Amino acid sequence: RNTDLSPDDKGSDVRGSQWGVNISLQGDRKLGNKWRVNGIASFTTGTDSYWTRGRLTRKLHSGYAVGAETIFHGNDDYAVWQAGAVMIDIKLAVETSLGLKVGARKNDGEDIGAYLGVELAKDF
């Protein structure tokens, strides 16, 4: 990883090039016919950074799933939380789907802002 900071922070441990190992754990569980919960937790050595996400979604008659997500990520230099709504499983092709998300994002020391996201998923 090579990280440029703006504004530059010469004392930051994540500034410049680092090598590390990424350790991730993912889980997904159906709760009945329509509900689903899943999560991801990831830690990267070298930058001591983490990224986690939890989702709860409900399948609609259209085939889409809608729900809520929470995300936490950071390291020694920053910490962010995000919370929002998701719509996933929007079929683009037989094994390809689109996901959309929108919500609030809070970085330590800053005002609450918004985030938008687009996800592309391919089954294999």
Image: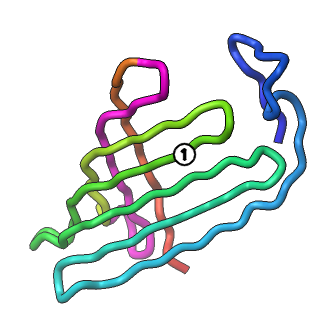
Instruction: Identify the main secondary structure in magenta.
Output: strand
User: Which residue corresponds to the image point at 76% horizontal and 13% vertical from the top-left?
Assistant: 8
Q: Quadrant of the N terminus?
A: top right
Tally of numbered discs: 1
The residue wearing badge 1 is 73
- Above or below residue 12? Residue 74 is below
- Image location (x, y in percent) of residue 36: 28, 76
The answer to if 93 sits in the magenta stretch is yes
| Left or right of 35, for residue 74 | right
- Image location (x, y in percent) of residue 12: 79, 26
| Left or right of 60, for residue 104 | right
| Left or right of 27, for residue 89 | left
User: Which residue corresponds to the image point at 36% horizontal and 55% vertical from the top-left?
Assistant: 99
Asked where in the image residue 4 lies, by quadrant, the reply is top right
The amino acid type of the residue labelled 1 equals: His
Q: Quadrant of the C terminus?
A: bottom right
- Image location (x, y in percent) of residue 49: 68, 47
Which of 67/111 is in front? 111
User: Badge 1, how many Cα within 10 Å: few under 14, some, many 20+?
Assistant: some
User: Which residue corresponds to the image point at 17% horizontal and 87% vertical from the top-left?
Assistant: 33
- Image location (x, y in percent) of residue 82: 38, 41
Residue sitting at the far bottom: 32
User: Which residue corresponds to the image point at 37% horizontal and 18% vertical from the top-left?
Assistant: 111
Asked where in the image residue 76 lies, by quadrant, the reply is top right
- Above or below residue 32? Residue 82 is above
Per the rendered image, the range of residues in magenta is 91-110
Asked where in the image residue 13 lies, by quadrant, the reply is top right
